[in-house]
Image (tube, grey):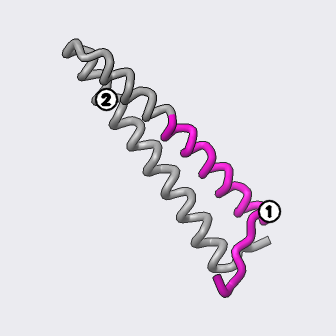
């Protein structure tokens, strides 16, 4: 079943947001690594925790995008 335009846009938005979360988490992990090498373990661990949250949100958004693609989540044309 082909997606209508609102659902296509919703799927694109969810996929794009998931990618943004992924790259934000990657950047935070890089910063955490530099902090760790500099001896700032507490801040490094804090950033790693935030990166983990972003990765969980990424997975959730990817799942929603898959549900939109499968037609389980539908945005009506008027929304």
Q: Residue at x 49, y 56 (%)?
A: 17
Residue 62, placed above or below residue 4: above
Residue 42 marker: none
Residue 40 falls left or right of residue 61: left
Q: Residue at x 60, y 43 (%)?
A: 59
* Callout 1 crowding tier (Cα within 10 Å): few <14, some 14–19, many ≥20: few
Q: Position of residue 27 (x, y in %)?
A: 33, 37
Q: Nearer the viewer, residue 40 or 34?
A: 40
Residue 22 falls left or right of residue 75: left
Residue 72 marker: 1
Residue 29, placed above or below residue 10: above
Residue bounds of the magenta highlight: 53-79
Element under disc 2: helix
Element under disc 1: loop
Q: Quadrant of residue 12?
A: bottom right
Q: Residue at x 19, y 16 (%)?
A: 38
Q: Nearer the viewer, residue 12 or 46?
A: 46
Q: Answer whether residue 57 is magenta in the image.
A: yes
Q: Quadrant of the N terminus?
A: bottom right
Q: Position of residue 40 (x, y in %)?
A: 24, 17
Q: Quadrant of the C terminus?
A: bottom right
Task: Name the chief secondary structure element in magenta.
Answer: helix
Q: Nearer the viewer, residue 2 or 34?
A: 34
Q: Residue at x 43, y 51 (%)?
A: 20
Which mark is first along the chain, 2 or 1? Answer: 2
Give the CA separation, mark 1 to mark 2: 37 Å
Residue 52, placed above or below residue 1: above
The residue where tag 2 is placed is: 30
Residue 23 falls left or right of residue 61: left
């Amino acid at each position: 079943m082909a997606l209508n335009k609102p659902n296509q846009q919703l799927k694109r938005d969810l996929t794009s947001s998931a990618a943004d979360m992924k790259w934000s988490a990657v950047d935070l992990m890089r910063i955490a690594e530099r902090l760790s090498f500099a001896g700032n373990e507490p801040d490094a661990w804090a950033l790693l925790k935030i990166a983990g949250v972003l990765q969980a949100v990424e997975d959730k958004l990817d799942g929603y995008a898959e549900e939109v693609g499968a037609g389980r989540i539908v945005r009506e044309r008027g929304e």
